[in-house]
């Protein structure tokens, strides 16, 4: 049976992916996005998104799953770029003409795209949080928390929109100050937490995540090098040393360890991916720049649901193989982009299943050799 809408296709996709998934880690030096395991932090695919995907990135800061797409915020291109879940470039969502400059973290909440903005080129207003309609890209204005200077990350924590910001970088590091702002309903702002190197250690906060215990964990890129854990009242309850590593991104793995992406002695040195055990403080390297051809400069980390298992012949992504798949199979003979474009013309979005579904004979690509195996699959369900 053919799905009646894109939302139904996405429901089918989510039903089979909520139990597992991977991680997207941006890399400013390689101008790419990597895939790692959300279970134990092991590498799955370096450069999952790169120039071959269709766009030359120039400082990817965050890759975020939005609906049936991946959106990548690029600091130097002044762009939020759109990709399929398979990593194929679709085009910009917003760019320099949207009055953004030197952007960092992004988040979508209640159909609003929040963008942390630092620069003032392209008509951008300097340090602030820019807002856009997440469907149309329409400009919804900017938010300027008092004292905002250099916002880095924006996320939703227990229904509250939080923004990390280094308020002041001083010649005296003890005077470096920072804040985690809260964007309040109705347009106001508040302060969730604040501090400095010389007081509580909050000096240059970057990515923030909500832990399974309900607390907020913040990667502090300044001194002291640490991950700082806050309770819901904004009080520090723990701090975990990262040695000399300047944390950019972090994620709580399925095994309970914290995956940490950061920079240390350089892209060909000890920049890389680490794990932190909060129970004993063990800080363990998983993949370093000096172990990786071309080096590493990893940044933010986000979850991406695993792709559904391949179902040979299910070219319309609805969970079975029937006559409704024929038109999609024919489109697939023209290549992956032709198949994706045809799917979008029918359902209004990108396919939530793999193009490999149409490679029914399993030898790679979709050709006339797949026709007989495809016909033989009609009337069958998916594994």
Image (cartoon, grey):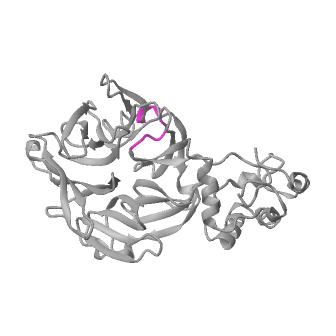
Q: Position of residue 115 (x, y in %)?
A: 34, 64
Q: Quadrant of residue 319?
A: bottom right
Q: How many marks?
A: 0
Relative to 119, 33 lies left or right: right
Question: Is residue 53 left or right of 255 when viewed as pictured?
Answer: right
- In the rendering, at what x and y percent does residue 361 appear? 84, 48
| Nearer the observer, 298 or 82 | 82
Kindly identify the residue that appears in the image at 86 percent across and 54 percent down.
379
Q: Is residue 56 left or right of residue 314?
A: left
Q: Is residue 73 left or right of residue 85?
A: left
Q: Is residue 78 visible?
A: no
Q: Residue at x 61, y 50 (%)?
A: 15
The image quadrant that residue 230 belongs to is top left
The answer to whether residue 259 is above or below residue 190 is: above
Q: Residue at left 75%, top 64%?
A: 2
Main SS category, magenta section? loop
Task: Looking at the picture, tell me which residue is in the foreground, 240 or 265.
Answer: 240
Q: Is residue 294 within the magenta segment?
A: yes
Magenta residues, as a range? Answer: 289-297
**344 w.r.t. 304: above or below:** below
Q: Nearer the viewer, residue 45 or 314?
A: 314
Task: Judge whether residue 246 can be spotted in this image.
Answer: yes
Report the quarter where the N terminus lies.
bottom right
Residue 32: percent from left, percent from top = 48, 51
């Amino acid at each position: 049976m053919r799905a009646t809408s894109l939302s139904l296709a996405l429901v089918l996709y989510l039903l089979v992916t909520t139990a597992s998934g991977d991680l997207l880690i941006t890399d400013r030096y390689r101008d790419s996005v990597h895939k790692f395991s959300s279970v134990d932090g092991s590498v799955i695919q370096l450069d999952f998104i790169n120039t071959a995907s269709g766009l030359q990135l120039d400082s990817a800061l965050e890759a975020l799953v939005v609906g049936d797409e991946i959106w990548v915020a690029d600091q130097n291109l002044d762009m939020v770029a759109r990709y399929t879940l398979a990593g194929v470039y679709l085009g910009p969502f917003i760019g320099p003409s949207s009055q953004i400059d030197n952007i960092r973290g992004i988040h979508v909440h209640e159909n609003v795209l929040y963008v942390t903005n630092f620069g003032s080129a392209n008509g951008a207003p300097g340090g602030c949080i820019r807002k856009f309609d997440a469907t149309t890209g329409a400009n919804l204005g900017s938010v300027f928390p008092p004292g905002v200077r250099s916002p880095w990350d924006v996320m939703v924590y227990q229904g509250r929109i939080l923004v990390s910001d280094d308020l002041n970088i001083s010649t005296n590091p003890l005077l470096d100050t920072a804040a985690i702002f809260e964007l309040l309903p109705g347009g106001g702002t508040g302060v969730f937490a604040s501090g400095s190197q010389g007081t509580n250690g909050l000096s240059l906060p970057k990515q923030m995540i909500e832990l399974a215990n309900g607390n907020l964990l913040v990667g502090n890129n300044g001194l002291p090098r640490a991950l700082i854990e806050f309770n819901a009242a904004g009080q520090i309850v723990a701090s975990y040393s990262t040695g000399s590593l300047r944390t950019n991104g972090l994620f709580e793995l399925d095994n309970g360890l914290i995956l940490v992406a950061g920079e240390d002695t350089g892209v060909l040195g000890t920049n890389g991916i680490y794990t932190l055990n909060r129970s004993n403080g063990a800080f363990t390297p998983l993949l370093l720049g000096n172990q990786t051809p071309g080096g590493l400069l990893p940044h933010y980390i986000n979850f991406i649901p695993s792709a559904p298992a391949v179902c040979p012949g299910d070219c319309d992504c609805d969970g079975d193989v029937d006559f409704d798949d024929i038109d999609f199979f024919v489109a697939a003979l023209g290549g992956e982009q032709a198949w994706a474009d045809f799917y979008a013309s029918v359902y209004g979005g990108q396919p939530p299943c793999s193009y490999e579904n149409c490679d029914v004979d399993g030898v790679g690509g979709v050709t006339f050799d797949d026709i007989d195996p495809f016909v033989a699959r009609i009337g069958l369900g998916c594994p």
